[in-house]
Image: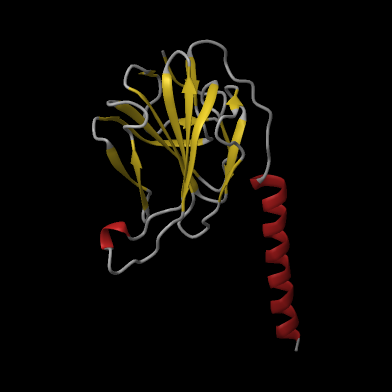
Amino acid sequence: MNILLYILFIILMLILAFFTYWRLWFLRDPERAAPKGRNIVSPADGKILKVANIKKPIVKVDKGFIGKIYTATKDVASETKLVAIFMSPLDVHYNRAPIEGKVISVKHTKGKFFAANKLEESLQNEKNEIVIQNKEIGKVKVIQVAGFLARRVICYVHKNQNVIKGDKIGLITLGSQCIIIMPKKVKLSVKEGQQVYAGTTIIGEY
């Protein structure tokens, strides 16, 4: 009986610890002030996993040990630059608009899991793609990618909505990734392995 009570106590403590972490740490929302000027800021807190020049109309982005997404780049420009940011469970998970402009599209895609008849399409993560039209630079796409197990992407914006650089545009639960695709003419100022912060770290300038 004492062993059972001890086990129940441990389970209760673990649940309480997770709830405390979730409410007080994971959902923390520090204020951010976006830098002024002709720049694009990071849409997420985290570490940069990949920086790449893209010429293909569709690109596959692997997500760590397991999972991947496919995304079009042709809806941004014929040649683009991609920056992928890994968001660990310890990072702030609110996403912010990388640039001022008008949201011209929002597209949510459910994840896929072990589709044996379509192996190439298997193990795809849930994603939400937000394309913002800026008067000076053109189109910029932010892709919210959910964790493979904790699949939940929350989007705060909608088509035809105007956003200001640094505005909150969504939230991703637990370990996840955020990707930004920009026109080739953007001059990047970040590198792989660098820690960045949503709404404040400058990704590139134009």
> Where is the N terminus found, in terms of image quarters?
bottom right
Colour mode of the rendering: secondary structure
The residue lying toward the viewer, choosing from 169 and 47, is: 169
Query: Which residue occupies the extreme left position in the image?
Result: 55
Q: Residue at x 73, y 69 (%)?
A: 12
Task: Give the left or right position of residue 55, taking residue 204 as reference.
Answer: left
- Looking at the picture, how far across and down is residue 24, in whole percent? 72, 47
* Image quadrant in which you'd find residue 86: top left
Residue 118 lies, with reference to residue 84, above or below; the image says below
The residue lying toward the viewer, choosing from 38 and 118, is: 118
Residue 76 lies, with reference to residue 59, above or below; the image says above
Q: Residue at x 72, y 66 (%)?
A: 13
- Looking at the picture, how far across and down is residue 183, in whole percent? 35, 22
Query: Which residue occupies the extreme top position in the image?
Result: 37
The residue lying toward the viewer, choosing from 188 and 15, is: 188
Residue 201 lies, with reference to residue 168, above or below; the image says above
Query: Which residue occupies the extreme front position in the image?
Result: 160
Query: Which residue occupies the extreme bottom position in the image?
Result: 1
Q: Residue at x 59, y 25 (%)?
A: 163
Task: Give the left or right position of residue 28, taking residue 136 as reference.
Answer: right
The residue lying toward the viewer, choosing from 27 and 103, is: 103
- Looking at the picture, how far across and down is residue 53, in whole percent? 28, 28
Count the marks: 0
> Where is the C terminus found, in terms of image quarters?
top left
- Looking at the picture, how far across and down is residue 148, in whole percent? 45, 57
Q: Residue at x 37, y 50 (%)?
A: 64
